[in-house]
Amino acid sequence: MKGKLILEDGTVFRGQIFGGTNANSEGEVVFNTGMTGYQEILTDPSYCRQIVTLTYPLIGNYGTAKIFEQSRKSFVSGLIIGELCTIPSNSTLERTLAEYLTVERIPCLYDVDTRALTRRIRAEGTMKGVIVSEYTSQLTIDQMMELPIDTDVVEQVTTNKTYTLESDKKDAPFVVAMDFGVKRHILESMNNLGCKVMVVPAGTSADDILSMNPDGVFLSNGPGDPKDVPEIIDEIKKLIGEKPIFGICLGHQLLALAMGADTYKLKFGHRGSNQPVKDLRTGRVYITSQNHGYAVDEKSLKDIPLEITHISMNDGTVEGMRHKELPIYSVQYHPEASPGPTDNMYLFDEFFKMMESER
């Protein structure tokens, strides 16, 4: 079936809508430059209510399998790709991408000039878009465009109940992870180090967390503007100075806001598995996986006891920070995504050692 993506500036990109999917959808249009990992992208809660464009031309060539899932379901609003592979090959193959999209009810527009679309987003910035069939009425399109993009996205993706990843290690460090849209591999990375990890809903109070007497608190990744959840920022403020804290992605931004710093929206964000980041402490450059549309304002850190530890080699934005006195640090990128493949796992080791030293 013929379909199209219409951006809020009126630009139209035509293609085919995969027939088994839900046809019409709306959301913020973004792009990801990774060559693989499409299922991880589709199940990363940080993409909630976004239409994701994949810049790599052929998608679906290794199919899908449950082992690649990063959350309980997909939260994306749509997928835009160049060529859809219908005959995948992989030893772990369970479903084709088309079958997966059908089950998850993800609108997919393919046979699209994704290079032109990406260039448009890079030039004009991320913007709202709608995926519709070729024959959708203009009235329906206008109504879809008028719908505001959701701001309660953390509430949509967080767990609705507390659960625990147990550890076989004696005297295992106990981590309470605040789930703002956490990826499964992050939790597994801490658990594989020997940590007992209790995952709690995003709205859990600082008092409830401290009553559990954890050895450390983890602030997870997640979707949306960090300023949309002031109530969570207020609870993080109460945790500062009480326990070691480690934050990733949205957790990094929320920690900065809780410390009195500021954040801002990037023109088109950092989304891909090939983002170079420099560790200012060692001078080493790491290739990292990233997915964020907001960043910590470097100027706002001037009078705050936080030092910048990592920066993006592409645009110089803040990629990591550490408290000058307290056991608190965070990074903007995803060490668990393993683009190195294990170059960035030292960040989890540092959190483990930090908790051990503070016990």
Image (spheres, helix red, strand yellow):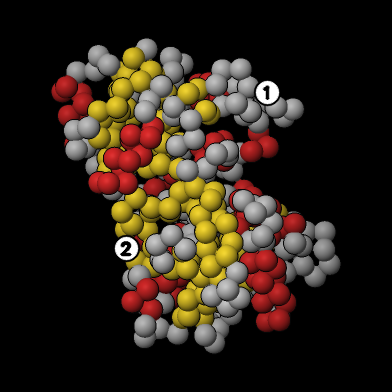
Cα distance between the residues tagged 2 and 1: 42 Å
State which mark lies toward you, 2 or 1. Answer: 1
Give coordinates of residue 106: x percent, y percent. 45, 28
- Pick the residue in front: 62 or 162: 62
Query: Does 259 sit above or below residue 344?
Result: below
Quarter of the image containing the N terminus? top left
Q: Is residue 174 above or below residue 158?
A: below
Where disc 2 sits, the SS reads: strand
The residue that appears at 62% across and 51% down in the rendered structure is 339
Q: Which residue is rendered at x = 67% and y = 52% of the image?
A: 341
Question: Which numbered marker is on residue 209?
Answer: none
Is 336 situated above or below 77? below
Mark 1 neighbour class, 10 Å CA radius: few under 14, some 14 to 19, many 20 or more: few
Q: In this rendering, is residue 167 above or below 39?
A: below
Tell me where residue 15 appears, x and y as whole percent: 35, 20
Q: Amino acid at mark 2?
A: Tyr
Q: Residue at x 82, y 59 (%)?
A: 168
Q: Which residue is mark 1?
A: 89
The amino acid marked with disc number 1 is Ser
- Is residue 330 something one can see in this rendering? no
Q: Is residue 133 visible?
A: yes
Q: Residue at x 57, y 49 (%)?
A: 183
Q: Quadrant of residue 317?
A: bottom left
Q: Is residue 107 left or right of residue 279?
A: left
* Relative depth, front residue between 339 and 20: 339
Residue ID for mark 2 = 264
Residue 5 in the image, given as x and y percentages of width and height: 30, 28
